[in-house]
Image (spheres, rainbow, N blue to C red):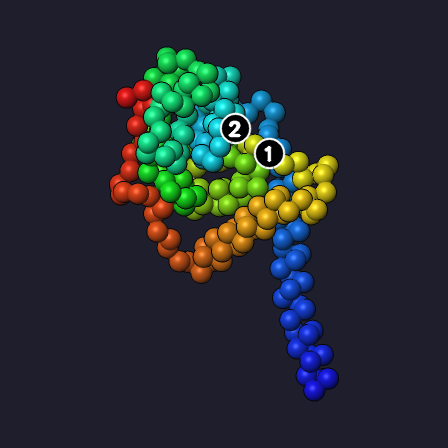
Amino acid sequence: MRKILRRTFFVLLVPFAIVVAAFLNFADTVASLQPPDNPKAEAIVVLTGGFQRIDQAVDLLKSGAGKRLLISGVHPATTGSQIRRNTQSSADLFKCCVDIGHEAIDTIGNATEASQWISDRGYKRVLVVTNNYHMPRSLLELRRARPETEFIAYPVVNSDLKTTNWLRNPMVLKSILLEFGKYTVASVRDIAGARPASGLRTVPSRATPAEE
């Protein structure tokens, strides 16, 4: 019985060690993400999940980092005018250069919505704005949906994983673990060649100008 238990322990220890190593590598990757200096692209896509992301994306648009902005995954009840007021932006900027996507319900939907928007306009180089811990999965889904487009990560850092002991912060640890789990599932799904649902409320979807 002791030999059986010992062998079982070692058999279970190997996959557990692999998972822990993969998680630590994921956390290190997220911690190392930094916004590029002087980013430049044809367009910008921001994945909703907080106004800090949207504020950053709008600031990038104002600075000329991209010519047009898609805000993907906006709640159907939220209007472009509300977002414009919350970001303290001009009506002219939103009217000329901002599109709102209301159909995405998850990250897969963000990628589907953004892919259609990019295809409609023929963009080749796009800045992606989202939280640092959400960036790996966002890029995975975007590149799967639109492999011919170059996506440039512009992470919004809410939690500084480099200089803080995030392992002792239950909220941060929970967020990283949850995102690692979702990223792992998405990676396995891609390796297996499975086709996910569109992640949209309705199909097909088109982003609309913010001030319409």
> Which is more toward the observer, 144 or 174?
174
Q: Residues within 10 Å of mark 2 (few under 14, many from 20)?
A: some
Type of residue at label 1?
A: Asn
Q: Is residue 179 left or right of residue 166?
A: left
Depicted 77 relative to depicted 105: above or below: above
Q: Position of residue 10 (x, y in %)?
A: 69, 73
Q: Quadrant of residue 19?
A: bottom right
> Which is more toward the observer, 151 or 52?
52
Identify the element where label 1 is drawn. loop
Q: Position of residue 168 (x, y in %)?
A: 70, 46
> Which is more toward the observer, 172 or 185?
172
Q: Quadrant of residue 104?
A: top left
User: Quick check: marks 2 and 1 in contact, CB under 8 Å?
Assistant: yes
Is residue 187 visible in the rendered structure shown here? no
Type of residue at label 2?
A: Gln
Identify the residue position indicated by label 1 in the image. Answer: 158
Quarter the N terminus occupies: bottom right
